[in-house]
Amino acid sequence: MKRGLFMHSPLLRTKKGWFALAAVAIVPLLYSGSYLSAFWNPYGHLNSLPIAIVNQDQGYHGHQEGRQVIHMLPKDLHTRIFTSGQNVHAQKLLKSGKVDMVIDIPKNFSRDLFHQHTPTISYATDPGTNYLTGILMDREAVSLTQSMVHHIQSHITHREFAGMTRLQQDSWKLHEAAATLSQKSQALKPGGITLSQDLKAVATASRQLSQNTQQLASQYHLFASNVQAYVLSQDKVNHNMNILSQKAGDFHQGILQEQQAISALASYANKLANQSTSLTSASSSLTQATTQLQGNEERQGQLLQEAITLAHKSPNNPSTQKELQQVLGRMQAHQVPIQNLSQHINQGATELTHNLQAFTQASSQLAASTQVLDQHAASLTASSSAFDTSIIELQQASAQITEAAQKIDSGAQQLTEPLASLAQGQNTASRSLGNLSSHLTQYTNSVNLITQPLSLFSSHLTQLSKDLGKAKNPLSVLASPLKTHHMNVGPQGNYGTGLSPYFVGLSLWVGALVVTVLVPGGKKDGLKTRQWLSLGLSAAQFLVLTAGILILLPLHPTHLVVFWLVLAAISLSWWAIMRFLVEKFGDGGRLLAIVLLVVQLSGSAGTYPIALSPRFFALIHPYLPMTWAIHVMRYALSGSYQSVLVPDLIRLLATALVCWLLTQFLPARLAFDAPSLESPKTLS
């Protein structure tokens, strides 16, 4: 009997009935399909969340590490890049929900990386805009930090490997320059010995010449005493003898000056030989230290190559990280001998430069003494010529005076031997001075040849010192090159506070929908009564809900008064929408209200951010009343979305006004009321 009644029901016998059944059957699928499709895999689309990056890095010596960090971020990451001074604008975007995280790169980022300082990257989020977004951004910050650390470690490792290669090349060049300098220094030693021998020969000839001069002066004084009587009577002979005496005195004085100059020349030559020996010793010591430094640098390069292999082999393996730390420790231990050898090389180079300066000064003094000796030799030669001239004039005078010649004949014979010895000594001294001048010129040329290798050695040593200074920096920060600082710009949220706007808006919508069951739509005659009655029920729902959640739940709105006002505005808007739907579409209006609810739950970003949803929901998101309601409630709870508070409130109230005007003045009514399950006959 009952089965027959069911089969004859208008719900199954009319198209409207079948349509109602189909709509009811589709609603669960619509809810599940819409909501699950909107948030099917939110964690797989984290790169779709908008992020602002404030790059304040000022760079360091042409290096822009901040830009390098930005370039290594995932290519599909939705980023907005800001420069220094735009941090305030980025924070405003974060507070308004237009970006979900702000990454701040400090201004000394590049300089800190190059000076063994660990820079700090700041991450800023606002849980007030979306609590789940804050949680997702925490995970994204950890992932981005790991990528940055890996990039910086790889960059430092490659840069240090290149630096070690340059250091090894500089060490080898320094070794070659030191070897060349040593060879050139060894070539100076024979020249110094020859120059010393020549100086000794000049000194011997000078001493012999002085002795001959003294003997000649003694014989001349004896000769002068023998002819004294005759000179008194002969003016001409007296005049010639006076001239001869004067010339002999000048010649003797020139011999003494030449002896002093030769003594000074011998002293400077001995000093030059000593400086040459010191220069050779310093060069040999520097060569040995350079060889040791090259060996240590090769070992350091092997350790660095081992560290690079471990870093690329398995960067997340704890055992590999432990081995990497051990290798880094050994590299730092080898760094101390390298620095000590570098200091020793710098000291040796300084000492070598000092010895070379002293050597050059001694060479200059020797050259000056040689010039003085040449001047004295020329003066001595002139005096000797003048002396010979006076002797000739005296012999002429003696020839004229036979008696005087006989008296001084014995004295003249005694003067002949010293004069011959003096001439022979003068020739010997001239030959020695010629040899000294020739060898001194050759030695000066050898000194000039060593200047170029020494300059090259000094250049390589300076470059090696610079590379050593650069090589000691980044190894200590390789294990942990980056620090992070995560801050919340708004109050710290929790799950309940974060999802309150979503569930409160949902509760008021469901409450307004339930009111339409108690106060359904109808004809125009009872509209005013139905509106006031339903409005009173909605107001009661608003008061009970607002007071209840504030009393029963630990909810502490940042703006309490605004919280009451926005919930009143939302309740009014939902009431106006529901009255319009149920008055103009009947039971179909309730169905439309359920469909709108399902769509808004998926597209209002009340749980996960809208950037993680499909494009359809992202397109309709800005135009959904639930989106506006969630924005204004989040402002009341946490202070976020301040920039959209007034516009969204205006949209909510404008929606309520439009729906009320349509309900009040639109005459058409397309009511779709589902037929009863029982037939009219059965009901009667």
Image (cartoon, helix red, strand yellow):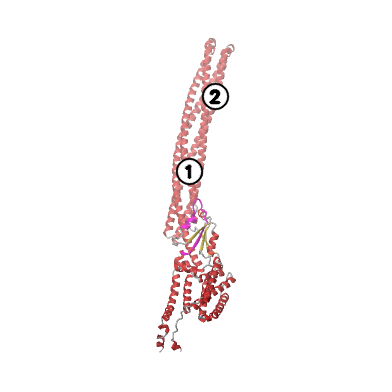
Image x and y of residue 155, in percent: 46, 55
Seen at 55% across and 26% down, the residue is: 257
Camera-nearest residue between 341 and 575: 575
Question: In the drawing, does residue 485 fall left or right of residue 30?
Answer: right
Q: Mark yes or no: residue 39 visible.
A: no
User: Looking at the image, is mark 1 or mark 2 earlier in the sequence?
Assistant: 2
Q: Mark yes or no: residue 584 visible.
A: yes
Seen at 43% across and 55% down, the residue is: 306
Q: Which mark is residue 254?
A: 2
- Give the answer, above or below, for where 86 lies relative to 680: above
Image x and y of residue 672, in percent: 46, 79
- Label 1 to label 2: alpha-carbon separation: 49 Å
| Membership of 421 in magenta stretch | no
Q: Which residue is mark 1?
A: 459
Judging from the image, what secondary structure is the residue with disc 1 in?
helix
- Give the answer, above or below, for where 266 lies relative to 248: below
Magenta segment range? 48-71
Image x and y of residue 677, in percent: 44, 84
Kind of residue sitting beneath label 2 = Gly
Camera-nearest residue between 205 and 174: 174
Quick one: label 2, few (<14), some, or many (20+) residues within 10 Å?
many
Judging from the image, what secondary structure is the residue with disc 2 in?
helix
Q: Looking at the rendering, in which quadrant would you find the N terminus?
A: bottom left
Displayed quadrant of residue 645: bottom right
| Membership of 60 in magenta stretch | yes
Quick one: label 1, few (<14), some, or many (20+) residues within 10 Å?
few
Kind of residue sitting beneath label 1 = Ser
Image x and y of residue 564, in percent: 58, 73
Q: Which mark is residue 56?
A: none
